[in-house]
Amino acid sequence: MRITTTRDKQRSFGRLLVALLAVFALVAAACSSDDDDDAAPATTAAADSGGEAGDDMADDDHDEDDGHDHDEDDGDASGDDMADDDMADDMASAACNGGQNVGGTLIIGSTQVPRHLNGTVQSGYATAVPGTQLNASPLLYDAEYNPMPYLAHDWDVADDGLSVTLHLVEDAVFHDGMPITSADVAFSIQTVQAHHPFKTMYAPVTNVDTPDEHTAVINLSQPHPAILLAMSPGLLPIIPKHIFDDGQEMPTHPRNSEDFVGSGPFRLTEYEPGTIIRMERFDDFFIEGTPCLDEIVMEITPESTAIVLGLENGTTHLSSTLGPSANVLRLMDNPDVEVSAKGHEAIGQINWLEMNVNDPALSDKRVRQAIAYAIDRDFLSEVIDQGITFPVPTGIAAASPFHNPNVNHYDKDIDRAKALLAEAGYGPGELQLSIDYIPPAFVVQAEYVQQQLEEAGIEVELSVSPDFPTWAQRVAAGEYQMTINQVWNWGDPVIGVHRTYLCDNRVGVIWTNNTGYCNPDVDALLNAAGQEFDIDKRAELYAEFQEIVAEDMPIFFLNTPSFWQAYNPAVMNPPTNNIWGQMSPMHEVWLDE
Amino acid sequence: MSDAMGRGEVAAADLPVAPGLGAGGDGGSGRPGRETLRLFVRNKAAVAGVVMLIGIVFMTVAGPRIYDNDPKDIVAIPLTGPGELAEARLGTDYLGRDVLAGVIGGGTTSMTVAAMAAAMVLVIGISIGALAGYYGGWLDSALMRFTEFFQVLPALLFAMVLVALFEPSMWTISFAIGVVAWPGIARITRAEFLRLRNLEFVRAARAVGATDWRIIRKVVFPNALPPLIVSATLIMGTAILFEAGLAFLGLGDPNTTSWGLMIGLNRGNFLTAWWSVTFPGLAIFFTVLSFSLIGDGLQDAYNPKLRGR
């Protein structure tokens, strides 16, 4: 009896060992996947712009304002009649309500978590909002895409379009007191060229000459109409060469977030990643009499609900990350909060349904067109988003001068969708597709598209990725059928539009050509438009490009989500007065308290 | 010990059974089972739990037949309040889907996931606990260190990693909950087995030549059942909460409505549309509460110290 027992013991122990091993293997797998997740952001670092698709925040390109527009001239800005269309000229005298309102702390609520604060090597809203307070750029932009003097008081573009000369202000200094010189401009441009994810932005730059300390000559290999826009605050922050030119890798340089030495109106005093960014006024800022504020504090929270409550009870002054449409509508009803759709026009962000044209089913143009006919983008904007987003039929946002509204809109037509599917050989229920997305940002779009496609007889499975890197890797590697994505125009099509269509831009990075779409005609049009200075001729080239893309349908454009800004009425000169919104210095913002 | 006394011939009825409640878990045909039932019924809170649970199960099973709105269909204007529309009595969510249909349909998912997860927890927990408690010694030490390894991992985080590792679906979610929630059951089982293994009736079984497997199955396990039944009931509640937690964090199966998923997806609209979060929240609340009350009632009913009170 004893012997039997022992043998049984041994047998059950063997069984147990197998089980143990299995569970350990499982745990090991889980842990190694954890490592993968940690490693992922590094491999997709260039692509992750944090803000580009990170949040369901809002924006709008239309100037519809529902009567909530706040115009700083409504207030009696010191009573003078100065023209405000050129704020640079009257900056010194009109700034901060004629110098009367200097001081105060502006509290900005945001859901966007920056990776670090150096905008020369990191794109995206999360970095650009604090980054543009901390670093100055050669140029500013007004609400009409007009360049304005900033670090460069003057600039000339050569007649042949092959060089741009910047004349820098002479008394500008970095936060450590060192002068800002043309060498720093040249270094910043080289850094952006080498490390910024927007390769097209400075690709034509051959070299930067620095004939003297305050003159920088940017030489180009071809005419580059986007070059001036590429000198916007968020796209070309001027960083100190004497700090960064020490041989360390720029994307991981410790000074990107520690002991930050910038060139902008505010200097960094506290940075708690993912929690708070505290920036104090820089007294030696080169624009006399500014900044008006003593301090800007960015409070970062993952919950837009907390931001809405903060705006309602006055503890948050300004935010553009308001969450779902219902939150925006709720704030609009609040007399103590101003809500505006203005500002951020240049971002031109578009939510779209991206289709992998290398997928066997989706390689058939008729299938992609059927999908387009099955979806009612107007219903999505008008009913589900309750007018907080705007339908857009094309990949160049409506606020851009190159937008072509006359492409095929694919107004909802279920019969046509079914007919196209039948032509392609799919009866009702015979086509199964999946949509990849990251919750919660794109839940509404994904679930709505699923609903609509099922109406047309396409079975759709939703597939969520647990985090951004997982999704980005899948999409960038082309391991998907359809995905909901948000991609930004970034002011000029050369910067934000070309990248998603060019045949040779299938480089395995998110927000490049992830559909696998390739049309030589489109390439030719884009390359021509990218070198054309004449705005009308450029517009013609882009108009034809948009028609071809609408016909080929690699991407179904859904809507322009809103970058609605909500702010306390005490905030004067809120960042609704320029095409970059909060991605522009707030040195003229003051508090009427 | 003769050869005739093979393992198969030791019938269950021949084996000594602990006095009191041994057969209680086997079907309640004996007197002790009836006594347990009587004690349970006397507990008003426990009965309320049973009534609640029957109601919820009825709702999830028969509900979709009676109330035929599909939880995934857009039926009305988004974010309409409860009572405003005949087609969506409890209001609509951010996409215009019926919240009532979601609560009914979500119940099926939540209950299924909870049941599958609880089953997995019981299988893993009881196996490991029984082996450790019965054999003791170094096997016990090894198994308990292994259990502790799982016990010290933050359960929800660990479950998130598991779900994220695979695609979120009902199966992977049940699996993840099962994998993280078993240590408690394992420890209870082990404690019971440790207590029982050297009692006289177990020794007697060993003396008549029963194999270990048979002793574990027929002698020790039935006597260890009462606390396990209580824990299993509570595990159901925990599993529902886990499922809700995972779905809330965006790791629910996006293709099937569940209560946690509804709360997670609608929470951004909580300020303006309380109903889209509140009703699935109440459903979770009442379900977990009912399991909890039933568990408490069972514990009291099984507790010999409370008998005859």
Image (cartoon, coloured by chain):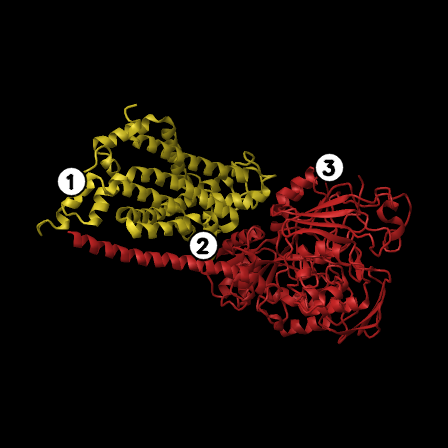
Tell whether label 3 touches label 1 (CB within 8 Å): no
Going by the image, does A41 lie left or right of A215? Answer: left
Within the image, what quadrant is residue B19 found in?
top left
Chain of the residue under the numbered disc 2 shown in the image: B
Q: Position of residue A335 (x, y in %)?
A: 73, 37
| Residue at x-position 30% and y-position 52% | B139
Please state which of the two labelled residues, at mark 1 or mark 3, is closer to the viewer: 1
**Mark toward the start of the polypeptide (1 vs 2):** 1
Q: Are marks 1 and 3 on the same chain?
A: no
Tell whether label 2 touches label 1 (CB within 8 Å): no
Q: CA distance from mark 3 to mark 2?
A: 47 Å
| Residue at x-position 15% and y-position 51% | A1
Instruction: Give the labeled residue for mark 2.
Output: B162
Q: Secondary structure at mark 3?
A: loop
Quadrant where the image shows the C terminus of chain A: top right
Identity, as a three-letter code, of the amino acid under mark 1: Ala
Q: Secondary structure at mark 2?
A: helix
| Residue at x-position 31% and y-position 31% | B303
Q: Which mark is residue A378?
A: none
Going by the image, does B303 lie left or right of B9? Answer: right
Instruction: Give the labeled residue for mark 3.
Output: A335
Whether residue B71 is visible, yes or no, is: no
Instruction: Give the labeled residue for mark 1.
Output: B13
Q: CA distance from mark 1 to mark 3?
A: 80 Å
